Amino acid sequence: MGECQRGYFEFETKEDGLYLTVYPPKTDMRPVSINEILYYVEKRKLYGCDSATLSEACKAGASQITCLKISDEKPHPFQEFGDYRISSDAMRVEAVFYPPFKGADCLSSDEIKKDLKSIGVKYGFDEEAIASFLDKKNYFDSVIVAKGTEPRQGCDGYVEYKFNPDLKPAPKMNEDGTVDFHTLEVVNNVQKDQVVAVLHPEDRGYAGKDVYDRLVMPKAVGHVIFHHGRNVRLSEDGKELISDVNGHVVLDGEKILVFDVLELENVDTSSGDVDYKGNVKIKGNVQAGFKVKASGDVIVGGLVEGATIEAGGNITLNRGVQGMTKARIIAGGNIVSKFLESAELVQAGGYIETDSILHSKVLAKDKIVATGRNGLIVGGDVRSIVLIEATNIGNEMGTNTTVGVGLDPAAKRKVDSLKKDLSELGNKKIQLKQIVTSLRKMQDSGQELDDNKKQMQSKTMTQMLLIDKELNEKKKELDNLKSQITEETNARIKVRGDVFVGTRLIFGDQSMFVKEKYSYCQFMKERADIKLMAL
């Protein structure tokens, strides 16, 4: 057992009374204070002590060992003891230890723990702290002799959005100082099977214990769940929200919604250009200079001015196109429009239906029909692979108008070019295969290939893979063109009213200028000639 390094005191009962010995500190630690002596006197009820003598002994003992009689009383010697205080939250017990009378007993570890148990402490005894005091005997210093286990605080759950939930369209400033109203980012596009949100569950933490061995619970945390509408599904573990469709995602309050139709009032400076993975419905107009691109269908309730509309599916234009020679309308499917006027290009992968086509370039793989109330095709260049049908083509003024059916001669030349390419690629593949076969035979016979042959083998196999890819692409393109050539066999131009002078009729690589007005008729290609026939 060590000896107290700081200043301390010791009482001793002798035949003639009570004596106090004050010891100075052995190091730079502080000496005994009068308050510590007075506390001891009061705690142990040492009556009759002379306070002036106590103070004198305390002062003198700061520098040298001082022993003075302080009372004629002869109390029974007290052993070493501790004064214990439990914190208000019951998470620690602090002890201040006091020295025994000279010759009295010192505390043991078990006695200290017994003292603690007597005041209700059941958990968290700090064996190291108790052992340290017993070893160093640092009296009058506060020692934490027991401490509880703090609870681990958790944290609230939250939803991580894989899109911008605070999307606020705003124009951008270009480097030249102009304002860009086209890239406003009005929607959060999502694709099918894309994760739109991730749920991070709450961490509840875990309970601790106080020195009374009672559970101490962590603070309550916020529980979260997904709030969502249709077109989304939960992952198997319930922690991800996944889109079932191509479209856009919206946060409405706490509810996550995915739509496969984007509805807009107009496409103008309020919306910017639109690039959408799904269907687009525009209630009003598409202003000149703006662009709408959709992977699905596009419906426009108002007028399309000199704008661009591209759709992977169908395009429906309820009021038509006033193109200003700049409009581009391109659909992977069909196009239905009130009218088409002054469009730079209208192109459909399916059919085109409209009331009138005026001064526009129009192309369709399927039929083009202009048989509404007006049923006009006037000016421009209108082409279909299978059929063009109109009430009137051209006009009395002889406006130059071109209508054509059948495959473009350039497409036929492309067929011949593709056949030649396929033949050359096939021959090259055979040659490469022979090289690979020869090298493999060498390996099978047990012959080891040198570095040059290994390089040749690797390079040859890579070339074969590239050729296979190119062959598949060209075969697909050829099959598509062949189907179009088959369709053009019965290609025709039908006129339910009049076809006027100034009209040029084209059937593949054959053309015919109309030199007189014809009515209620149709034109077809028969061998190398274009024939006029009755409907």
Image: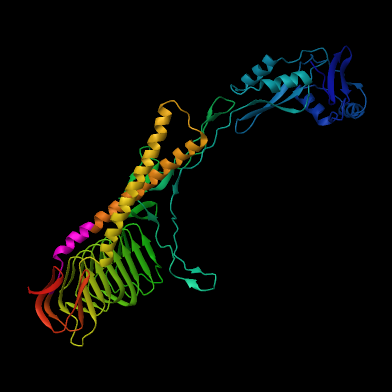
Residue 190: image x %, image y %?
Answer: 37, 53
Residue 415: image x %, image y %?
Answer: 27, 59
- Identified at 65% across, 18% down, the residue is 113
Residue 30: image x %, image y %?
Answer: 84, 31
- Would you say residue 225 sits in the magenta stretch? no
Q: Main secondary structure of the magenta part?
A: helix
Which residue extends farthest bottom? 397
Nearest the viewer among 504 and 215 is 504
Q: Where's the C terminus, which quadrant?
A: bottom left
- Would you say residue 491 sits in the magenta stretch? yes
Tell me where the magenta segment starts and ends, as one range: 482-494
- The reply, left or right, for residue 228 in relation to residue 506 is right
- The reply, left or right, for residue 124 in relation to residue 103 is left
- Identified at 54% across, 73% down, the residue is 177
Looking at the image, residue 250 lies above or below residue 73 = below
Q: Where's the N terminus, which quadrant?
A: top right
- The reply, left or right, for residue 63 in relation to residue 213 is right
Q: In this rendering, does residue 319 appear at all?
A: no
- The reply, left or right, for residue 285 in relation to residue 487 is right
- Identified at 23% across, 75% down, the residue is 339
Looking at the image, residue 26 lies above or below residue 504 = above
Nearest the viewer among 329 and 102 is 329
Looking at the image, residue 222 lies above or below residue 54 = below
Q: In this rendering, does residue 405 appear at all?
A: yes
Name the quadrant containing residue 360. Answer: bottom left
Say how the picture is coloured.
rainbow
Residue 532: image x %, image y %?
Answer: 10, 75
Name the quadrant containing residue 312. Answer: bottom left
